[in-house]
Image (spheres, rainbow, N blue to C red):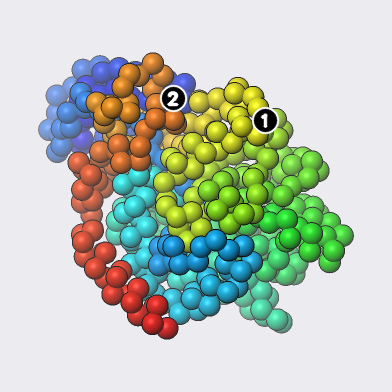
Amino acid sequence: MILIKNVSAILDSKTYKESVDIVIKDSKISFIGDNAKENNYSKVIDGSNLIAMPGFVNTHSHLAMTFMRGYAEDVTLQDWLYKYIFPLEDHLTYDMVYFGTLLAAIESIKTGTTTVADFYYHPQATLRALSEIGMRGNIGIAYASKPFMDKVIIEEVERKFRELSGKDEKILISLAPHAPYTVSQELLKYTKELQKKVGSVVQIHLHETEKEVIDYMKSYTRTPIEYLASIGFLNEFVVAAHCVWVSENDIKTLKKNGVWVSLNPESNMKLGSGLAPIDRFIDAGLKLAVGTDGVASNNNLSVLEAVRIVSLLAKGISRNPRKLSVTDAFDILTVNGAKALGFNDVGVLKEGFKADLILVRKDLPEMVPMHSPHSNVIYSMYPDSVNTVIINGEIIMENRKILTVDEEVVKKEFKNLLSKLIQK
């Protein structure tokens, strides 16, 4: 058991408490209150200079793209993908994805993220990396269409899904068709049927660029969102990344079907794709979460930074400072993302919930004074204010040191693999 003694605590988006004790037993929070009973604690943490809060949730990333950080800059999404990223990705190996994911997980944890969504190549390597470092995640099995191969592809996806599911209690497996412009309508229908069969989350890129929407409408006379709705693809288990170029009808369709929208403002702006109409999403009552995308288009994995930009864009686009409250932004950063990815006992600090929490130094200049603790998190806190990270009741980082893997070894192996990749 772990005791965090005399700690300030942001329990959720509405509740802040001064000087409480938090007891963690096994993987869960067993007590939050005053004067925890004396016990044989395996670890006692002095929380007098710390704030405990739920860990952050990144609902859209491609973790092993760490190899491509800064690789293709100042180009459009289409050129970025087809001239730079796809050709390099053809040479990625299992080991590259494994060490690339480990490096991304270290960065994520050090910036306060405890749960991450990912879909990329070699999902078994991603699963191994996240399991070894101790992170919670939802790993998508990524796929796109190939001529006359859609039935074979979906059968292989199902095989991988069943092979990887249940390997780690902290990790869920999802279906991850890339996007409607790379996945045929037939394969999207197969995906819908498989999702119903296995009951998983579906991750997908939707309406990221104006061109993809225009081209789709030329071919099929409707938007990708309208098509997906027409075949019954959209539901509350779908996490749609981006949704930048959407009509009013698209927004109503997303709302009607309970789709989660993962906002990725840094990637969208950096690639010149545009800005999601966050103000209209809020007005429509869409379910919102936040993601970083891969570091090839961001170029970091701080989801805290991403939600800050979401909040500022909501206010700036609408010219209304009330458009996204601090408490709603905090939900987007924590509990919303957890629910979107299929974790219903994560995202708040509550007795009986999983012990996924971070401890942030409250004595740092940017955290003083604390008129509004939630505001300090969203608008003032730096990612490296995070001191300690606990996931599923295990201390993963303490005093900024990762405990579960050797960070220096990971960086060394990563650099060796990077040199091999670039030579190709």
Q: For this rendering, which residue is in front, 155 or 340?
A: 340
The quarter of the picture where residue 199 lies is: bottom right
Q: Which residue is mark 1?
A: 318
> Which label lies toward us, 2 or 1?
1
Q: Secondary structure at mark 2?
A: helix
Q: Which residue is mark 2?
A: 375
Residue lying at the far front of the rendered structure:
74
Q: Earlier in the sequence, mark 2 or mark 1?
A: 1
The quarter of the picture where residue 166 lies is: bottom left
Residue lying at the far right of the rendered structure:
221
- Which residue appears at 71% of the width and 66% of the height? 181
- Which residue appears at 35% of the width and 80% of the height? 420
Q: For this rendering, which residue is in front, 188 or 352?
A: 188
The quarter of the picture where residue 39 lies is: top left
**Where is residue 140 shown, x and y percent of the image?**
52, 60
Q: Is residue 4 visible?
A: yes
Question: Which amino acid type is shown beneath numbered disc 1?
Answer: Ser
Q: In this image, 416 relative to 157: left or right?
A: left
Q: In this image, 258 relative to 128: left or right?
A: right
**Where is residue 374 shown, x and y percent of the image?**
43, 25
